[in-house]
Image (cartoon, rainbow, N blue to C red):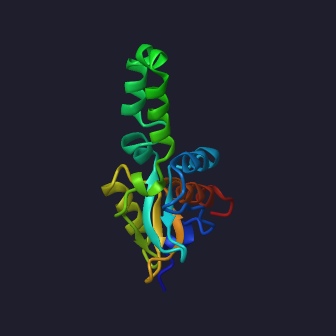
């Protein structure tokens, strides 16, 4: 009998997710509050439709969208004189939804994936974290992060340090 761990053994089952219509500002607050690298984006039936990561927030658009932030900083004097233009920029940022910036084709793992498949996914996709774990109907049943993988290594160390070995 194979006793090697599976993705089910290490994944987080209580998944915090967002909907496509969630505001980017609200999603950012959720990610920051929980210190996540990203969250799955699900429809009303909990089916995966995308993922929103810190990378998406920084590169595609949000309150911390770097190109927009750089533009505001470079033009701060102009914005002080032309407050209406500045307010327009802020309004366009705050009207963004998760659907506007999410990755709609995220890397996933099937619920029957092995631990080795999870490790390989992280090894081959450096920016990916977390990875949604889905069932046959694309419903999110968990997420696995690099931290979950590393936690298992910590448990192995504890097992090898136990007395009686």
**Residue 142 place in picture, x, y as percent:** 54, 69
Q: How far from the left and from the top, in percent, is residue 15?
A: 59, 65
Whether residue 2 can be seen here: yes
Foreground residue, 102 or 114? 102
Question: Looking at the picture, does residue 73 appear above or below residue 141?
Answer: above
Which quarter of the image is occupied by the C terminus?
bottom right
Residue 5 in view of the camera = no
Q: Residue furthest right?
A: 163
Indicate left or right for 29 with 63 as reference.
right
Q: Nearer the viewer, residue 144 or 140?
A: 140
Picture coordinates of residue 19 (x, y %)? 53, 63
The extreme bottom residue here reads 1
Residue placed at 49% from the left, 86% from the top? 1
Q: Nearer the viewer, residue 80 or 36?
A: 80
The answer to whether 2 appears left or right of 14 in the picture is left
Outermost residue, left direction? 124
Q: Point out residue 49 in the picture as x, y percentages from the top left corner.
A: 43, 68
Q: How many marks?
A: 0
Q: Residue at x 45, y 82 (%)?
A: 137
Q: Is residue 95 left or right of residue 66?
A: right
Residue drawn at x 41%, y 65% as measured from the top left: 118
């Amino acid at each position: 009998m194979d006793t090697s761990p599976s993705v089910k053994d290490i994944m987080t089952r209580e998944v915090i997710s967002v909907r496509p219509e969630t505001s980017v500002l609200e999603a950012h607050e959720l990610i920051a509050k929980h210190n996540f690298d990203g969250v799955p984006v699900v429809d009303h039936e909990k089916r995966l439709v995308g993922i929103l990561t810190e990378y998406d927030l920084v590169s595609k658009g949000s309150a911390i969208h770097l190109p927009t932030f750089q533009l505001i900083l470079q033009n701060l004097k102009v914005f002080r004189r032309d407050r209406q233009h500045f307010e327009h920029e802020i309004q366009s940022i705050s009207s963004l939804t998760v659907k506007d910036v999410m990755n709609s084709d995220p890397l996933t793992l099937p619920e029957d994936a092995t631990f080795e498949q999870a490790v390989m996914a992280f090894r081959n996709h450096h920016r990916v974290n977390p990875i949604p774990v889905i069932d046959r109907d694309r419903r999110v049943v968990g997420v696995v992060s690099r931290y979950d993988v590393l936690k298992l290594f910590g448990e192995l160390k504890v097992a090898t340090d136990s007395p009686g070995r």
